[in-house]
Amino acid sequence: MDAQENPVSEAAALPDLEPATRRIAALLGQVDDRRLDGPTPCPDYAVRELLGHLTGLATAFRDAARKDLGASTAVSPDAALPVLDDDWREVLPRRLEEVAAAWRSPDAWTGMTRAGGVELPGEAAGAVALNELVVHGWDLARSTGQPYSAGEAELRSCEALLAPAEDGPNGSPEDGSDGSDGDSLFGPPVPVPGDAPLLDRVIALSGRRPDWQPES
């Protein structure tokens, strides 16, 4: 049987969002209420807004994978500051499990869908979802003083998504997008040495300083 006709082989070849969601879930236990007003690498967000954003993006990309195109997939992430609900400690881990499960379906990666109010192919939406989880996981870890790492396959996917298009003006994509589906939390790339670790290069491509600390 041809590999393209084998659903098991096809599913095994798809990117897996579960490692990224598990890392974020593992970070949550160290986020006590005293940390919620602390700064993050996203200038407009304290930790509470970052957690609210993670909850919203997990919901939106879960529904994008399911092609359940309603209110959750219609709103741009920078339309308003995210609000962190009181039950976030129960809701966010559940949403992370749900978004990972939704993107295990091969159907999630085909056809068209919507996220952040933007229509895009399922394959592109999955790549954006993975990038959001990896980079914002780093944001949360760095904001709360916790270690963070990511797998090479995940980082290569993020690098490919965030790298400026070579043929765009001034080295940026021709459509002006930074690859993050309109997310204003991703800024212009920050220069880093060519031999910097892959994680640092990805973080720099997302517009963050890899050496960022809460007091910086």
Image (tube, rainbow, N blue to C red):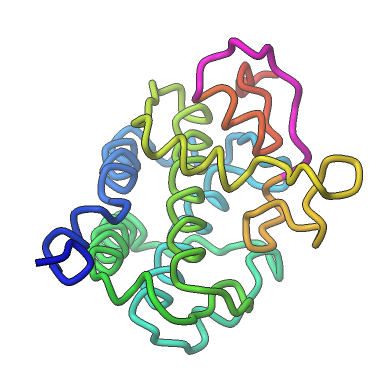
x, y (%) of residue 68? 39, 87
x, y (%) of residue 88? 36, 59
Q: Nearer the viewer, residue 32 or 28?
A: 28
- What is the quadrant of the N terminus in the image? bottom left
x, y (%) of residue 134? 45, 42
Numbered circles on residues, count: 0
Q: Main secondary structure of the magenta part?
A: loop
Left or right of residue 5, residue 91 in this image: right
Residue for point 61% across, 36% down: 40
Residue for point 46% across, 36% down: 156
Which region of the structure is painted magenta? Answer: 187-198
Residue for point 58% across, 41% down: 37
Left or right of residue 10, residue 110 in this image: right
Residue for point 68% across, 12% down: 193
Farthest front residue?
1
x, y (%) of residue 5? 17, 72
- What is the quadrant of the C terminus in the image? top right
- Determine the image quadrant of residue 76: bottom right
